[in-house]
Image (spheres, rainbow, N blue to C red):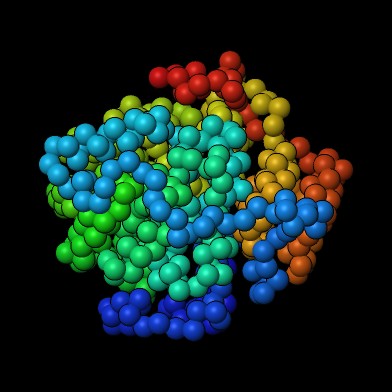
């Protein structure tokens, strides 16, 4: 697991004795974004925080971050999401207008950035979340805003996710992005120690009045719907009360991760789809399911068993961004060998496509490094010396990374992705998952 930089660790991991982090402004220009907690490689200090760029692009061709001070363009006016039955009708009307997406890229710190979202969309993802954004830093640090939130017109439907524990600060951040997204999402599910120390994410489950105030503040003042992403309580009745409270506070869509706050290891703990089903049956707004989505059979089974309106995938997409197009890695075809065929696509192909998107939509090199490690993990296990060459590279370039892919191919590494016989990567959802 990667360690944050000493300065970041010292600031974001302060023991505040439950006093909100956001009430103690710090010198923000010294900050860079916290390292991802799930990437394999060691990080390389300042070099990896530099924004990647394509030296062949002219100034006019360079993409720019959206203006975050524009007037919202969504239909409706502040407060209407709290008006009785019409609120539920509006929640469903908005979801229907977006096409009722079922295949969704989950929020991942440092990993669900624009180039990766666009790669997943190319391979079947119908909506996506940004990485979690820190609401106070987003308000106060222009560099953080410009590097950590980028989008484009094809990047829709889009959820922009914030962590927060102060309603006013959250609203200020949300107003900056509401005209560039389809939902402003509140992170109520992060179970990591950084969230405990910062007093946000799943650790707000101990303070439901504060959670309610966060949702109400946005629902009363934004022109875009508010969504929330949560984890379940150990007791189902507590989860249902929590979900109903969020709905009553003005939440227009709820994503439910079927693990508790203490169940951090997705490989060790299975998500409880029965809890998600119970939440879906209890609420009158769209409900999304998160957990146990490794391939399209899981998508089909989850939708059938939970009745959810869509599914989110995170870790599996990092290894296989083509999951939603029906592709699966070899470790998920062992029991179905007779039904699986070589999909004529592999993770090296996906890395090249991702790098091209990064040239078009620059992001910090640390994100690129993490994705290369994740997508080529199986390849590096065959040729570990190539991984070591990547780890030893303190300053990445596109030339080096394209060359790394070529090197793996020249060494004879072949790790194809598979599809079920008869599945179409370009087919619609019903064709791919059989519903």
- Seen in the picture, residue 121 relative to 174 is either above or below; the reply is above
> Which residue is outermost to the front?
71
Q: Residue at x 40, y 29 (%)?
A: 99
Q: At which x and y percent is residue 61?
A: 72, 51
Q: Locate residue 134: give its quadrant.
A: bottom left
Residue 12 falls in image quadrant: bottom left
On the image, the x and y values in percent for residue 142 come to: 53, 70
Q: Nearer the viewer, residue 5 or 77?
A: 77
- Please tell me whether residue 152 is drawn above or below residue 39 in the rendered image: above
Which residue is painted at 36% across and 31% down in the image? 97
Direction from residue 315 to residue 284 in the image, left or right: left
Would residue 42 appear left or right of 278 to someone viewing this image?
right
Along the line of sight, the residue nearer the viewer: 237 or 51: 51
Closer to the camera, 433 or 99? Answer: 99
Pinpoint residue 300: horizontal percent, then vertical percent. Answer: 41, 27
Horizontal side of 130 relative to 45 (left or right) equals left
């Amino acid at each position: 697991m990667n360690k944050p930089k000493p300065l970041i660790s010292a600031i974001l991991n302060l023991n505040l004795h439950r006093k909100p982090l956001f009430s103690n402004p710090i010198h923000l220009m010294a900050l860079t974004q916290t390292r991802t907690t799930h990437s394999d490689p060691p990080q390389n200090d300042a070099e990896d925080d530099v924004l990647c760029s394509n030296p062949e692009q002219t100034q006019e061709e360079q993409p720019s971050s959206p203006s975050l001070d524009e007037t919202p363009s969504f239909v409706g006016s502040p407060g209407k999401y709290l008006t009785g039955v019409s609120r539920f009708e509006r929640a469903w009307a908005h979801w229907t207008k977006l096409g009722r997406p079922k295949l969704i890229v989950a929020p991942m710190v440092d990993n669900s950035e624009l180039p990766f979202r666009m790669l997943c969309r190319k391979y079947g993802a119908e909506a996506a979340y940004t990485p979690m954004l820190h609401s106070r830093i987003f308000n106060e640090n222009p560099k953080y805003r410009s590097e950590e939130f980028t989008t484009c017109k094809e990047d829709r439907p889009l959820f922009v996710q914030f962590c927060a524990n102060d309603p006013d600060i959250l609203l200020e951040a949300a107003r900056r992005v509401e005209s560039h997204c389809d939902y402003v999402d509140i992170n109520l599910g992060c179970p990591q120690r950084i969230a405990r120390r910062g007093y946000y994410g799943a650790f707000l489950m101990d303070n439901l009045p504060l959670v309610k105030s966060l949702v109400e503040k946005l629902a009363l003042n934004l022109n875009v719907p508010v969504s929330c992403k949560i984890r379940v309580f150990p007791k189902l009745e507590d989860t249902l009360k929590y979900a109903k409270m969020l709905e009553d506070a003005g939440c227009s869509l709820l994503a439910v991760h079927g693990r508790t706050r203490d169940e951090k290891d997705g490989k060790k703990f299975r998500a409880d789809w029965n809890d998600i089903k119970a939440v879906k049956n209890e609420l009158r707004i769209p409900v999304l399911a998160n957990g146990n989505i490794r391939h399209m059979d899981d998508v089909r089974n989850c939708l059938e068993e939970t009745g959810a309106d869509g599914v989110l995938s995170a870790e599996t997409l990092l290894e296989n961004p083509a999951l939603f197009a029906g592709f699966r890695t070899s470790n998920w075809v062992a029991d179905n060998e007779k039904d699986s065929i070589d999909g004529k696509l592999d993770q090296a192909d996906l890395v090249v496509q991702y790098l091209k998107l990064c040239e078009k939509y620059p992001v910090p090199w640390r994100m690129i490094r993490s994705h290369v490690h994740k997508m080529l993990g199986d390849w590096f296990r065959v040729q570990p010396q190539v991984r070591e060459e990547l780890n030893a590279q303190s300053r990445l370039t596109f030339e080096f990374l394209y060359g790394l892919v070529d090197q793996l191919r020249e060494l004879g590494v072949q790790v194809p992705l598979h599809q079920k016989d008869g599945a179409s990567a370009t087919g619609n959802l019903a064709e791919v998952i059989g519903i």
